[in-house]
Image (tube, rainbow, N blue to C red):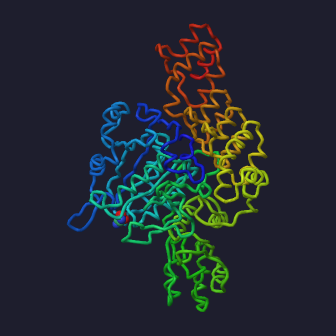
Amino acid sequence: MAIDGAQTGKKGSLLSRALSSTEPAPALEIGGGCTTMSEVRVLVINTGGTIGMVPQSEGLAPEANKLAGALKKMPVLHDVAYANETQLYSRLKLGKDTLVLPASKQNKRIIYTILELHPLLDSSNMTPAEWDKIARHLKINYEKYDGFVILHGTDTMAYTASALSFMCENLGKTIVLTGSQVPIYELRNDGRANLLGALLFAGQFVIPEVCLYFCNKLYRGNRVTKVDAESFNAFCSPNLPPLANAEVDITVDWETVWRAKTTKRFAIHTNMNCHVGLLRIFPGITAAAVKAFLQSPMEGVVLETYGSGNAPNNCPDLLDELKKATDRNVVILNCTQCLHGSVTSVYATGKNLMDAGVISGADMTPEAALAKLSYVLSKPGSLDKKRKKLEESLRGERTNSPIGTQISLKDSKFIQKIAQSLLISCKEELGAVKDALTPPLACAAAKSGDLDAVKALRNMGGNLSFGDYDGRTPLHVASCEGHLEMVQHLLKSGATMYAKDRFGATPLLNAIKFRHHSVICLLRTAGAHLSSQELVNVGTELCSLAFNGDVDGLRAWHLAGVDLNQPGYDGNTPFKVAEAAGHVEVKEFFSQLTT
Ligand code: ASN
């Protein structure tokens, strides 16, 4: 993904900036063909929902094999002329389910392919089996696309978004769920705007989360709940502000964006534990009803309690049933029935629940709590470890008080001095100074391998995924320099390895060019891959290395996962070139590869 403000983000990046940026867009390798510098690829997984429904004898229901054809007739969602003029279908070897958005101001294109699941479902019919299916498609297609959109019914979208947020481990790309309240085939509908917005976020921004886009807002998927069956504004995120607002400008709150801080590659976790449930406390609920609900095979229950996590404590039998269940290792997670707020132990009625072994779910939505229980209980490990995991924030699904005080860049003497000399006083301008200064400072620190300086910038609230004026991030610089420890630190701080500088290069290509083998291996382990744009003419590059007897250079490409048998412009393979030039050491290197 190109590193401009729009894609990795300066806080408050504007759509106008995104669209008028001079950065090249990423290119991807799909089906053997090549996208151009100005094209990005998004996969749209259509699971069903109102967005693609038509009236049938029993009411609205999804209709298969209709959506792509219908979208092709909507100029705002498909540019026929561009597809024809650029021979999109033959060039990329694409089927009829691929469409292309009209050009952005900067002449960038989002090419999106619709993958329709069978059968399409009203989301009321969704089960964990469908979550597995979606996750598998994400895994299979992960390297082929820049971002992903999942079309889904609104009724259980919050459940699926929550589940996928946990099932997608070490996520580095944007996944956006969306749908609509009115079918896209109707004259007045919200489907067109929701799909367009979701595509723009998935194609133009690296927000490495499972998100939900609806009615001009991008939310963290595991923070939302459906609150309205009649309004276009169907969702709310009661305990976390939206990640982005798409008004006249698109404003991304980059400080809220959650990142997997890891060197591990993207993976999916399927087969969630299905012996979980939601139990809502109500006045008069009996101990017998609670007992029945908690019986085997139940392994985990989200208890929806009153206010700040309270349940009756004047009914000893009821508390006794909860205690007996937790003693049997049934995990009970306490969430409030209130839309807004958190579980605390302010009241005796709440404290007594904790005494019975119930775990606080803090400010998690019941949807997120259920998905988290299902995820954590399906993982190996001791019950103690699982109970601890439930109290942690795994994907930003609950607000935990930060460990230690976070220093804000606003508090930094350095920034304050600069602000004073620039006569800056307001919060927004201070933030702009911070965003402008972080990239060059972090890149300088990355170049000299100064881990302490990078850590200090991070602690001051600096975003290590921001690029400088050339879109070069600290990860690019550290990869060029071969600072292994720095690369590791940056990845563990959430820096994106999908960043592209203005020349279209990723940190992996930088590490190859400078033959930093250990950095290449680390980036590869973390899931880094080259784009088709970076692979153009690679055969000729390999032949040139072979001609010069450059084993180190060839090894770098090999470690990056590139096939070294690709011919150069004249059809000769690197091996042939080395042979002709009499480079015995290169020939030996090739023979080692084959043995
Ligand atoms: N029943 C529909 C669904 O969840 C509601 C919608 O999508 N607006 O599939």
Q: Where residue 559 sits: x, y (%)?
A: 61, 30
Q: Where residue 466 sits: x, y (%)?
A: 63, 45
Q: Residue at x 75, y 41 (%)?
A: 445
Q: Residue at x 53, y 38 (%)?
A: 23
Closer to the camera, 584 or 531? Answer: 531
Locate residue 372 relative to residue 430 in the image: left or right. Answer: left
Locate residue 501 relative to residue 348 in the image: left or right. Answer: left
Closer to the camera, 210 or 574? Answer: 210
Q: Where residue 7 sits: x, y (%)?
A: 54, 46
Q: Residue at x 69, y 43 (%)?
A: 488
Furthest residue in direction bottom, as rendered? 314
- Snapshot quadrant of residue 188: bottom left
Quarter of the image with the C terminus is top right
Q: Where residue 400 sits: x, y (%)?
A: 66, 66
Closer to the camera, 16 or 494? Answer: 16
Ligand 1 - quadrant of the structure image: bottom left
Residue 296 to residue 537: above or below: below
Furthest residue in direction front, as rendered? 423
Q: How many marks?
A: 0
Residue 164 to residue 561: above or below: below
Locate residue 349 relative to residue 338 in the image: left or right. Answer: right
Closer to the camera, 43 or 102? Answer: 102
